[in-house]
Amino acid sequence: MSFATLMVCMRVDRPNAGLLAVVRDVAERFGSTVIGIAVKQVSSHAYIRGAGPCEPHQYGLRKFAERAAAAEDEFRKALASVDNLEWRTQMTFGPAYEHVANEARIADLVIAPVDGREKLFSPSGQVEIGDLVKSVGRPVLAAPTETTGLPFGQALVLWKETRQTRRAVADALPLLKATKRVDVIEIVEASAIEESRRRVGDVGAWLARHGVEANCSAQVGRGSECDQLRAKAEDLRTDLIVAGAYSHSRLREWAFGDTRDLLSRVRRCVLASH
């Protein structure tokens, strides 16, 4: 199992340097083809602002085309060392994440930017990563905007006894095999610590059979789970976090506990599967 094809969700309203640094590291490690995609949903307000019925829509198309062209130029320059590059762009009346999810039929891994400082409901009309993770049917590697790449030094698997976590760890195998050190941790109540040790021991045995030696531990939860995980990630100097993703509500939250909170505080690359 490898990542023969990566799909990268480009932002057209800001630079993508951190995102593309991660893409370059992954593509060079696995010899991947990289498909860049820029998608924006047509704003429903566009038809209200202009004088004529078509003018705002045409103006929005022109602006998007200009920004997408600039994003493509950034994409190709940043990934000049990658042999196979493709580019796709689309302005859509439906949600941007739905278009990306459909296009991702060609990809093994989708890489998307995440900014923990953004509001839950983004007015940009671009891909919302929470919706993307839930709908794409592929693992998603979320790259914080301030990251400088993915050096494959340390990975941290956040274990929960859920279908989503099992899927995420299986999807992450190529990355885990390429990483120098892998830790598996489950945070539980004190009464469940022995059963948790048995679970993470099983995870470690499964990983070992796939050529990944992991340090597995069960820890008693103390205070905020997010803060405890952040401290662990900082102690280990973690480059990559692997976790399951699941819906909390109709407010587009997606998380292992609260992923949006974790991403905004830990600011590490996170591979999530739903």
Image: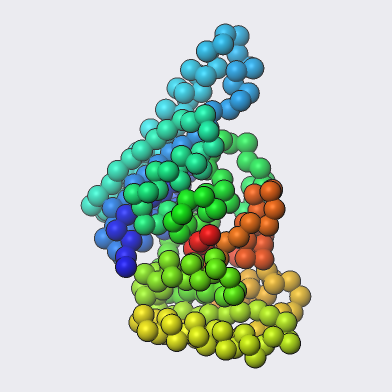
Residue drawn at x 67%, y 66% is 257
The percent coordinates of residue 41 (x first, y second) are: 53, 32
The percent coordinates of residue 126 (x first, y second) are: 53, 39
The percent coordinates of residue 85 (x first, y second) are: 28, 46
Residue 92, placed above or below residue 230: above
Residue 206, placed above or below residue 58: below
Residue drawn at x 63%, y 88% is 195
Residue 61, placed above or below residue 88: above
Residue 274, placed above or below residue 166: above
For residue 39, side relative to residue 224 (left or right)? left
Answer whether residue 252 is visible to the viewer in this image: yes
Q: Report the label total.
A: 0
- Residue found at the very far front of the displayed protein: 163
In the image shown, does 121 or 72 lie closer to the viewer? Answer: 121
- Residue found at the very far top of the displayed protein: 52
For residue 227, side relative to residue 148 (left or right)? right
In the image shown, does 238 or 166 lie closer to the viewer? Answer: 166
- Residue found at the very far left of the displayed protein: 83
Q: Please identify the quarter of the rendering in which residue 219 is found.
A: bottom right
For residue 93, side relative to residue 109 (left or right)? right
Q: By what rule are the colours in the image chosen?
A: rainbow
Residue drawn at x 36%, y 38% is 88
- Residue found at the very far bottom of the displayed protein: 194
